[in-house]
Amino acid sequence: MTASTESLDVADLQRRVQAVYQQVAEQPHRTYHFEMGRGLALRLGYPADVLDAIPGEALESFAGVGYFLDLATPRAGERVLDLGSGSGTDSFAAATLVGPTGEVTGVDMTQAQLAKAERLRAAAGLGQVRLPTARATSSSPTA
């Protein structure tokens, strides 16, 4: 077996991933190489009553891998950080658990996902959810 000397173009990979998830945010009814939607969320263990409290458009773009809020058990007034928040499904689910006195921050690398989540957050009146806008990334750290 020989070792490969090819290097991974991280910037290209990031652009490609962002492009796919931009499409997921903007065109959730297209066919992708992964499953999406409410049916997937139910199969992953999301309680139906929690999904009922989440904006339907967020669920359309849901492409998660598991339900973990039952393990984390956020309670009223607590803070939650949702990394890879996408269109907001987990952020909105966590918001139902922490209530109006809690805080949920959703972070995603795809601006289109954050924009969709922010639009849905505002329409649903979920003031306890924060969705900082995506920033341009570079290969070097910034101060």
Image (cartoon, helix red, strand yellow):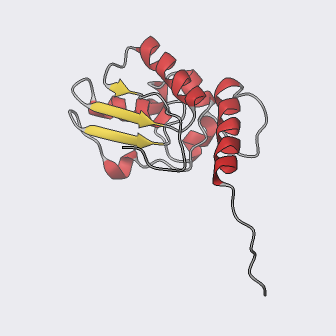
Q: Quadrant of the N terminus?
A: bottom right
Residue 132 higher or lower than 65, as above or below: above
Question: Which residue is nearer to you in this view: 123 or 83?
Answer: 83
Number of numbered discs: 0
From what the image shows, is residue 26 above or below residue 85?
Answer: above
Q: Is residue 35 visible?
A: no
Q: Nearer the viewer, residue 10 or 36?
A: 10
Quadrant of the image for the C terminus? top left
Task: Name which residue lies at 52% across and 28% down.
Answer: 114
Lateral position of residue 14 relative to residue 92, left or right: right
Q: Residue at x 54, y 50 (%)?
A: 139
Q: Is residue 96 above or below residue 64?
A: above
Quarter where residue 110 is shown: top right
Residue 124 position within the rendered picture, expressed as x and y whole percent measured from the top left: 43, 15
* Viewer-nearest residue: 75 or 108: 108
Residue 122: horizontal and vertical position, in percent? 43, 14
Left or right side of 127 for 59: right
Q: Position of residue 79 (x, y in %)?
A: 26, 38
Q: Residue at x 56, y 44 (%)?
A: 64
The residue that appears at 52% across and 50% down in the rendered structure is 66
* Whether residue 83 can be seen here: yes
Residue 29 location (% of width, % of height) = 74, 27
